[in-house]
Image (cartoon, rainbow, N blue to C red):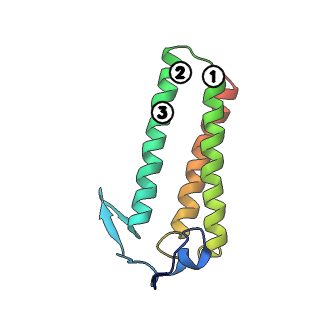
Amino acid sequence: MTDKPEYNIFHFSYCLSKEKRDFVGPIRRCGISFRSVEHFRWFRGSIVSFCLFLIYILLVHVWSMSIEWQKAMCVLLGIYHLFISFLAIIVTDWGKNNGPIFSVDCIWFNALMASVYACFFLSTCYV
């Protein structure tokens, strides 16, 4: 065995502890300040998945494909972001305890993304 303990990113104390990781601190990318590298990675992944979703919507309308797949994608991505938002609420105790993985920013950003996907879903219901 090694002296270095294993860290589980889903364990709450790991998510809040700055000492257990090499915490770089705030970083600035594309004119936006992020609390940590993990926040930047999550933001980048969310924006890339949203752009791919927009391309998918465009292809659905160009090729006149079934809109049911678009609804399913809205539901899946919306539930995913809503789950992360609720997880951030639990881990940070409503934003009172910010860490390198979860923070109050995770709550509002993921809730915002979930509401964007919900708006897309509702717009497909009336087409």
Q: Is disc 2 surrounded by few (<14), some (14 to 19) or many (20+) residues within 10 Å?
A: some
CA gap between label 1 and label 2 equals 7 Å
CA gap between label 1 and label 3 equals 13 Å
CA gap between label 3 and label 2 equals 10 Å
Label 2, secondary structure: give it.
helix
The answer to whether residue 15 is above or below residue 52 is below
Residue identifier under label 1: 67
Residue identifier under label 2: 60
Quadrant of the rendered image containing residue 4: bottom left
Give percent across and percent down for residue 108. Answer: 56, 60
The answer to whether one can see residue 43 in this image is yes
Q: Nearer the viewer, residue 3 or 13?
A: 3
Asked if disc 3 and disc 2 are in contact, CB closer than 8 Å, the reply is no
Label 1, secondary structure: give it.
loop
Tell me which numbered mark, 3 or 2, is placed earlier along the sequence: 3
Q: Is disc 3 surrounded by few (<14), some (14 to 19) or many (20+) residues within 10 Å?
A: few
Residue identifier under label 3: 54
- Residue 43 located left or right of residue 95: left
Q: Residue at x 56, y 55 (%)?
A: 110
Tell me which numbered mark, 1 or 2, is placed earlier along the sequence: 2
In the rendered structure, which amino acid carries the disc numbered 3? Leu
- Residue 82 located left or right of residue 16: right
Residue at the top extreme of this rendering? 64
The answer to whether residue 126 is above or below residue 13 is above
Asked if disc 1 and disc 2 are in contact, CB closer than 8 Å, the reply is yes
Tell me which numbered mark, 1 or 3, is placed earlier along the sequence: 3
The answer to whether residue 62 is above or below residue 70 is above
